[in-house]
Amino acid sequence: MLQFDLLKTDPTSHARRGTLTLNHGVVQTPIFMPVGTYGTVKGVMPRSLEEMGAQIILGNTFHLWMRPGLDVMKSFGGLHGFEKWDKPILTDSGGFQVWSLGAMRKITEEGVHFQSPVNGDKLFMSPEVSMQIQTILNSDIVMQLDECTPYETNGKKTTEAEARKSMEMSRRWAKRSKEEFERLDNPNALFGIVQGGMFKHLREESLQGLLEIDFPGYAVGGVSVGEPKDEMLDIMQHTPHLLPAHKPRYLMGVGTPEDLVQGVADGVDMFDCVMPTRNARNGTIFTRYGDLKIRNARHKTDHQPIDTSCTCHACAGKSGVSWDNGGREGFSRAYLHHLDRCGEMLGPMLTTIHNLHYYLNLMQEVRQSLDAGHFAQFRAQFKSDRARGI
């Protein structure tokens, strides 16, 4: 089941405000989706995700197939019951993971033959197998199996001919994915993925082919795969607003706070990225006023919280009241610096909570600005605040 309602459009850009109704709940868009590769958003309890406003999270088809395996997933009725998350879940197809195995895999028209990175077993992933796995996972949004077109092949920029060959196979795989999805009588929603590398006319051809197959939602894939930032932004500005206006649009694997706000302006409804969680574990913290490197020595004696304007647990403590409003229950930068230096697990847990809260709150502010008809003003203030520095 999927129903997308377009509530409002921004007259100064391609930005949209909508609601996405799925089998496990309603999602307000534009939305950022935290990534939970192995059935968990690293270091964050499901209750904390709900408290910070997460409406939908991701699971990884490939990794969950490897561990714990489909028999375990069947016994729990799918991923929701296994990880105790009762809101919507999107699962990727597994295509990016098998592509990233490099020499350990062989891609053919039938699918991908590869060795398991867990135990070395010989395995096979096809559009049909991906649909079968995702049906067992019972994710609300299922992604077609595609081939992720690389920016470079053997150290050289992927040619137009190579990108076309990859895109056309992904389009054929899209048709096979839908046929198997329907054969399995999966009650959820299947998205097609636009490919074509950095070639705009190939992106348009890919989309036309997917429209003929007809999906309830569409994604833009094959960006943030090693290309220069200006080329990624070029594809972002070109492709999303070409997708059907009456269906949800998903930009896969992007990115920074600036990327999200730009993506909304380009017509994107849904985003995911490992950046807020991965960067948190590596000591980089996102704030309204720029990025903070908690490992820098200058934070060793700093009594301030990460961000005085933030109401997350790390910054404001259990009261949820920011320091600017008199709350004094949050954790200091000095404490977080100390935890990082000592390798204490609480450190990345707190910084992950902050980063996710920041991303989710950013998208809430985007939605509020669209509701109020002030998105252009919001974008200008966002850029000014981020450029100011913390």
Image (cartoon, rainbow, N blue to C red):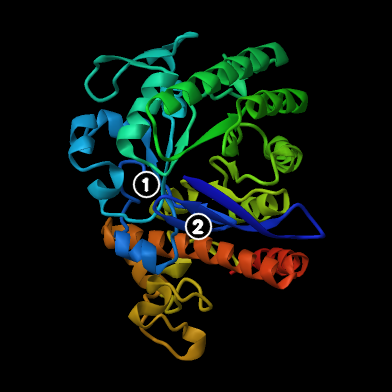
Quadrant location of the C terminus? bottom right
Q: Is mark 2 on a helix, strand or loop?
A: strand
Give the number of the disc on residue 250: none
* Rendered residue at 29%/23% (across/down): 117
Q: What element carries label 1?
A: loop
* Rendered residue at 47%/82% (across/down): 322
Q: How crowded is mark 1: few (under 14 residues within 10 Å), some or many (20 or more)?
A: many
Regarding residue 225, the answer to whether it shows in the image is: no
Asked which quadrant contains residue 236, the reply is: top right
Residue 347 x/y as whole percent: 32, 62
Residue receiving disc 2: 27
Tell me how many marks there are. Answer: 2
Residue 89 x/y as whole percent: 40, 47
Q: Is residue 203 above or below residue 356?
A: above
Q: What residue type is labelled 1?
A: Gly
Residue 358 x/y as whole percent: 51, 64
Residue receiving disc 1: 36
Q: Is residue 211 above or below residue 216?
A: above
Whichever of labels 2 and 1 marks the residue nearer the N terminus, that label is: 2
